[in-house]
Image (tube, grey):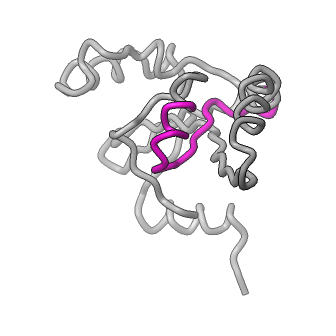
Amino acid sequence: MKLELAAQIEMIRKRTGWTLYIAREDEHGALLDEWIAAEPDHAGRTTASAWLAPGKGIQNLLLADRTGPLLFLRCSNVMRLDLQIAPHAELRAARALAIGRPWMRAMVRDQGYRELIGETRGPRLVRFLERIGFRESSTEYVMQL
């Protein structure tokens, strides 16, 4: 029988000593600013204030063990967009995507998503997506759930 999520989390907490806190700027901002300043890839690129900013679809967490804080997590809802365009309808599909973009962005935001992600290797589609506001990202890693 599967344990409920809360029971699984409690079992892990007891076994490991890990505790998960809601991270807040007033409580954790100074610590996070210190960690950001010590990380060459992050220093000058973000702040605790930006990292811990609340928002729809955002959850800011701090994981600690028995010794102390381990890591901050900023969890954001993202939506993966997969497209299959009808054969010989590329121009009509492009027009629909371009004209429908404001509606799609609003709909996705209203549902609490912070980012829209898609994958393609088609050079024409890449150029089109860039024209309507997508950007290439080569620094992200994906885990299928």
The quadrant of the picture occupied by the N terminus is bottom right
Q: Position of residue 68 (x, y in %)?
A: 33, 41
Q: Which residues are magenta?
A: 110-128
Q: Position of residue 39 (x, y in %)?
A: 20, 27
- Above or below residue 105? Residue 53 is above
Residue at 51 percent across and 21 percent down: it is 52
- Above or below residue 71? Residue 66 is below
- Above or below residue 112? Residue 11 is below
Left or right, 18 with respect to 96, comes to left
The quadrant of the picture occupied by the C terminus is bottom right
Left or right, 54 with respect to 106, comes to left
In depth, the one of 122 and 76 nearer the eye is: 122
How many marks on residues?
A: 0
Q: Quadrant of residue 55?
A: top right
Residue at 69 percent across and 42 percent down: it is 90
Toward the front, the furthest residue is 88
In depth, the one of 66 and 30 nearer the eye is: 30
Q: Residue 45: within the magenta?
A: no
Q: Position of residue 123 (x, y in %)?
A: 45, 42
Left or right, 19 with respect to 3, comes to left
- Above or below residue 91? Residue 144 is below
Residue at 67 percent across and 67 percent down: it is 7
Q: Position of residue 86 (x, y in %)?
A: 75, 53
